[in-house]
Image (cartoon, rainbow, N blue to C red):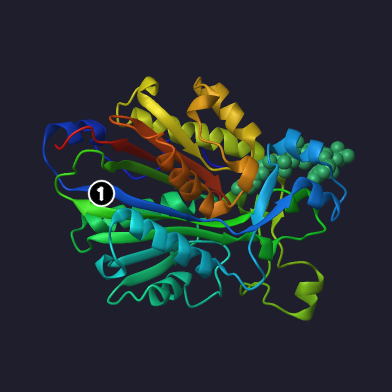
Amino acid sequence: MSDYSNSGRNRDSNVPSAVQSESSARTTVTITGTGSCIPEKILTNDDLTKLVETTDEWIVSRTGIRERRIAAPNETASDMAVRAGVRALESAGLGPGDIDLVIVATITPDMLFPSTACLVQDRLGMRNVCAFDVEAACSGFIYITEIASAMLQSGRFRHALIIGTEKLSSILDWSDRSTCVLFGDGAGAAVLSREDNPGEGRVEVVDTLLGSDGSASNILYMPGGGCRIPASADSVAAGYHFLKMNGREVFKVAVRIMERAALEILQRNNVPLEKVRCIIPHQANVRIIEMLSERMKLPMDRFHVNLDLLGNTSAASVPLALDEAMAEGKISDGDYVVLVAFGAGLTWGATLLRRHEKSL
Ligand code: UT7
């Protein structure tokens, strides 16, 4: 595995973007709306004890998860994405006709192709829209935040709808206790907009760093369904269409990667830890978040945690937590917020957000 430092795009370290943002009016990308979709069905730890040999005590003490949501059999990743997207549009005060870019992050698309983003574009009645999916697993939302921000900054697009959506219940082996207790379904969305002079209360996407290390692709993956192992009776019998994970390995790497990514994004923008109001980490395991808190020397009350009720929803995890944190007022004037995630690939990323106190 590679060294996880120095990840992300090259930039002029002498001119951190947070400092640039103070000095002159410039084109910014802001989060103008967020939204969520959480399926109705709750699956508790006690429910799981009827499926596999496990206990509520084991799951809570090892992961912090108490329950998760499971999509209905006929409810797909695009259905949840549409509902989260509609809510994000409403909160942005925009209509489908205002959006010119749709990006969906998912590892559980409705189909391998066409993209889930195209299904969302059609269902929302959007026209003349660029729409595509990104597969970066649990880091997916950070990846699409960066991609959308760069496309908006190019000047060719004005408003982007970005969505993380997952129906992980469709790729879980419900007889494997080491994985089926961890994951849940849901979708989270945000509208990103290009604004020349962000107004009071606007949440700016200040900076994002991304990284990857495919040499660790074998610690979290789904072997079947691609061209290497296409679907066949044998592949289904062998369980190749289920998520596979080496939990201990993922755990170790996750703590290290998220700490480095979060610290690096702060460091390169000259933002001291005390100015960080909230960290919104990928919701995989509360013990990973507790270790992050310990290593970063930031108290747990600065970390937004909702995995107790939703489990790990992969690409939906960060936007679901972001929508909740915004609704709870955890992003107030002048505050910095860090989104940070890691996932299969391996992939990782961190985004620095800041809420504007007044018009610049
Ligand atoms: O989005 C990224 C996705 N993945 C992650 O973030 C996962 C990161 N890893 C983890 O969260 C943890 O490694 C797990 C929660 C998956 C497992 O916790 P652990 O403390 O690393 O447990 P372990 O894998 O070392 O297993 C300890 C024991 C084993 O039994 P033996 O071999 O000691 O007898 C497992 O068979 O716990 C057993 N075990 C269970 N027992 C009851 C594994 N799953 C369960 C279960 N209920 N659900």
Residue 309: % across, % down: 63, 44
The answer to which image quadrant residue 354 occupies is top left
Identified by mark 1, the residue type is Val
User: Callout 1: helix, strand or loop?
Assistant: strand
Residue closest to the eye, 118 or 346? 118
Residue closest to the eye, 270 or 289? 289
Q: Quadrant of the C terminus?
A: top left
- Residue at 47%, 38% in the rendered image: 280
Residue closest to the eye, 88 or 215? 88
Q: Which residue is mark 1?
A: 29
Residue 268 lies, with reference to residue 7, above or below; the image says above
- Residue at 69%, 47% in the rendered image: 67
Q: Is residue 183 visible?
A: no
The answer to which image quadrant residue 300 occupies is top right
Residue furthest out toward the left: 24
- Residue at 80%, 55% in the rendered image: 176
